[in-house]
Amino acid sequence: MKQDFTAWLPAIAKNRRTPLIVAGIAAIGGLALGPAAVAAPVTSGPHAGAVAAIDLATGKNRQATTVESALTTGSSTSKVPAGKPSRDKLIPHGVEGAQSRVPLDDEQRANAKAIIETAKKTGVGERGAVIGVATSLQESKLYNLGHLGVYNDHDSQGLFQQRPSSGWGTVEQITDPEYASRAFFDALKNVHGWEDLPLTTAAQTVQISAYPYAYAQWEEQAADIVQQLW
């Protein structure tokens, strides 16, 4: 997790344009240690500066211009749009615990679309896409974050907060949405039986977050995003 965030961030989200509004967030992201990592134990609780870091990096304190949509508020109908994946494919095990949602701007939607398209290319399908989008919602709120200066979590960057020093790729690679997504999904496919695991278990086995249960809160919104953008 990010260390003490009490100053201006010298390098922040790439190409950000619209502020992030956080609703019901318990903690921000974790530490993506490496592609072949094993789940880490729970620590004492949310890092005090983590939420502030993402807020500063994505401009939460500025006037909001994001538009509410079904991607934020949930679909108003149970009918599956033509050609879109069903809820059973997206959330086969049901959600775990209270769910969080954030409004999405054009940049976040574009990043979500990149994750979904890469899920198709790597063969992880609709369920893998949900896991990927939920993981990025937790790690970066679907913003392609650059380095946060002295307040950065080691060398973590990008949509999934991956670390070059842990074998995820170069800085240029992990801040490329398609490359970062492919790296995540390639690691996910190495998790035995990932398709049958709860989302937070699958995500945590790849990411090695200090807060392994935080991914679960984004499953419902991630499913809505995948269903609409698939």
Image (cartoon, rainbow, N blue to C red):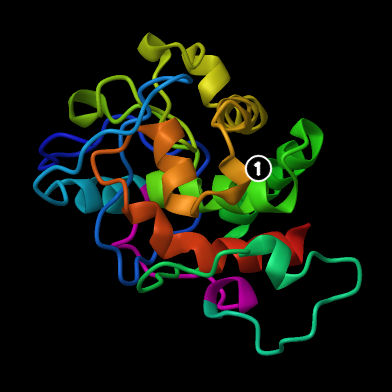
Residue 104 visible: no
Residue 132, percent from left and from top? 57, 45
* Above or below for 76 versus 123: below
Q: Is residue 208 magenta?
A: no
* Above or below for 197 versus 36: below
Side of 47 where 33 appears, left or right: right
Q: Quadrant of residue 206?
A: top left
* Above or below for 112 versus 176: below
What segment carries the magenta color? Answer: 58-72
The residue labelled by disc 1 is 115
Badge 1: residue crowd in 10 Å (few <14, some 14–19, many ≥20):
many
Residue drawn 59% across and 50% down?
196
Q: Quadrant of residue 26?
A: bottom left
Query: How many numbered tags mark residues here?
Result: 1
Of residues 90 and 69, the one nearer the viewer is 90
* Above or below for 185 versus 66: above
Task: Give the overall secondary structure of the magenta segment.
Answer: loop
Q: Is residue 71 magenta?
A: yes
Residue drawn 66% across and 52% down?
127
Secondary structure of residue under mark 1? helix
Which quadrant is the C terminus positioned in?
bottom right
Side of 141 where 220 appears, left or right: right
Residue drawn 45% across and 11% down?
167
Residue 203, percent from left and from top? 46, 42
Residue 78 visible: yes
Residue drawn 65% across and 46% down?
128
Amino acid at circle 1: Ile
